[in-house]
Image (spheres, coloured by chain):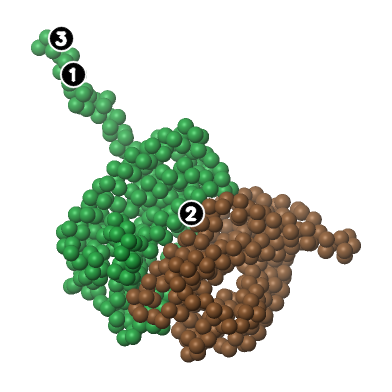
Amino acid sequence: MSGIEKMKAQNSLRARGSSPLFVRGRWLRATETWRSLRVAAWLGWQIESNWTDPFLFAIYSVVKPVAGALILVFMYLVVARGGLGNPLFPFVFVGNAVYIYVGAVLMGLSWAVIDDREHYGMLKYMYAAPLNVYAYLVGRGVAQTAVATVSAGITLLVGVGLLGVRITPATVNWGLLVLSLALGLGMMACLGILLGGASLLLAWHNFRLGEAVAGSLYFLSGVVFPLDVLPQGVQMLSRALPTTYWLEAMRRALLGSGGNATLAGFCDLGILGILGLCALGALVVSVAFFRWAEGLARRRGLLDMQTMH
Amino acid sequence: MSIRRKWATFWRTVVGRAYPRVIGMNREKSWMIFDVFLPLLQVGAYVFIYRAIGAPPEFTGFVILGGAMTAYWMNVLWSMASQLYWEKETGNLQLYLIAPTSRMAILLGMALGGMFSTTLRAAGVVLVGSVVFRVPLAVAHVPAFLGVFLLTLVALYGLGMLLASLFLLWGRQAWHLANLFQEPIFLASGFYFPVRALGFAVAVAASVVPITLGLDAMRQLLYPQMMEGLRFLPVSYELGGLAVLAVGFIALAWKALRFFEDLARREGRLTLRGQ
């Protein structure tokens, strides 16, 4: 092989990403991403939990969601004939329990940006350190998801153990549950990062953003009532939201039926397909939007903005 | 300092502390949209639950009234109880402490400013909610209704002043505890259903939060027929209870503020940030 041919071969290898330098760079980025995610998950857990002793933290994590569920129980008991035996009750209860994830992940991730930038004043140092901020935010979401899993699990246990919600291991569609939970959590993490990106650019409204989006999803996704009771126009909006399909999938997996007549035409695989597409779309859009928002925040000097403290 | 001068300073402090609440909270007009729109989402969801289970239309009114009172409870939690914690975090608390004025005047100013700003938001929730969900709102005894409402606010903000004193000791616990006092209180005080559904003993215990008695009395005055079988106590008893709570909380807040300020000073917690 002539010298020129050797050079061409080396360039071709480099172009395919096989040069030792390129491989080392890619490896470094991968370890950096993993480290950012791991350390952020640990940090998120510390921020969430180390303000008190583990016992009080456990009570705190359980009392809030169970009280939220009991509000629905008593609303139901005051009015509904047939008490908790009414078939609408398990629909309402399960929707409310799994919605804990939506609130925790969406609000948690957008709040992490505000907290790090404005309360702890650490965001600028993160950008000065060798870490992947996107992975860091996903890591912060991991801690929120862990707490939400405990809260949702205990709320469901209270429903099954004390309130007669019929969920048994034999009747649960485990495959659908695992797949829809994984797709739903991934999708919500991406939506949370999308909100985190928006929070980078906002001053006065950033602390309301997660709350507003989570609140709108609570209403429009039919968390505690069937979509069929909504006016037709609002139903169309509900059918355009990914969380509507996620809640439907979770209810089908746990209760055997989604309870929404308007979504009855979709088979389980169809619902999973929509969820998968939504998750993929959310990933692409969140990565693109977050990069754009980061760039704009750098150019406008917003990474160390102080508007609240 | 003469008594007259002391009072003049007291009232100037009250006005001075209420001013940023009134002006600051209303400076960003779009916040008003969030403050009315966000509670309405929750209210809307609960209205549709009642509709889905075939509840009478008065229950929609119960939910809207509860949703409006939510604004006051949130204001008491986040802008009264946690306020001294925020001030500590932002470095303002020491300025309050060296100012030659009464701390009670500062708390009273916070309360009055908060009441005014929150009333605008609560009125927005009631107005928009009653129009969107077509709720009949007809008060049979306006003076009694206003009396219950005002007494509820005095007692509620008295509780807020007491909590502010207690929260003075805490760091991040203050934030988490304020967070914890949301759903459990919405449940125990019957924000979205008549509190009697919880049983008499629980309703009595929950009456320590003035909204429990206030909401039950206001619902009785708004929907006397519907509340016949759902009321917790007669309105006159609830008015008496609210008066006792109002006086008790303000007196306790005065004592507690002195005690906890002294304790926090001794334990070095007044200027400790990021605990």
The answer to whether residue B150 is visible is yes
Amino acid type shown at disc 1: Gln
Residue in the image at 69% along x and 72% along y:
B250
Indicate the position of residue B247 as horizontal and vertical percent values.
70, 77
Residue in the image at 15% along x and 10% along y:
A4
Circles 3 and 1: CB atoms closer than 8 Å: no
Name the image quarter holding residue B258: bottom right
Amino acid type shown at disc 3: Gly
Instruction: Return the residue nearer the eye: A94 or A80.
Output: A80
Q: Residue furthest left?
A: A1
Residue in the image at 30% along x and 29% along y:
A25
Q: Is residue B65 above or below residue B28?
A: below
Task: Specify which label sits upstream in the sequence, 3 or 2.
Answer: 3
Disc 2: CA contacts within 10 A as few (<14), some (14-19) or many (>=20): some
Q: Secondary structure at mark 1?
A: helix
Labels 3 and 1 positioned on one and the same chain: yes
Chain to which mark 2 belongs? A
Q: Is residue B75 left or right of residue A247?
A: right
Chain to which mark 3 belongs? A
Instruction: Return the residue nearer the eye: B72 or B54.
Output: B54
Labels 2 and 1 positioned on one and the same chain: yes
Judging by the rendered image, the residue that carries numbered circle 2 is: A208
Amino acid type shown at disc 2: Arg
Residue in the image at 56% along x and 63% along y:
B121
Q: Secondary structure at mark 3?
A: helix
Q: Is residue B201 above or below residue A215?
A: below
Instruction: Return the residue nearer the eye: B250 or A44.
Output: B250
Judging by the rendered image, the residue that carries numbered circle 3 is: A3
Q: CA distance from mark 2 to mark 1?
A: 54 Å
Judging by the rendered image, the residue that carries numbered circle 1 is: A10
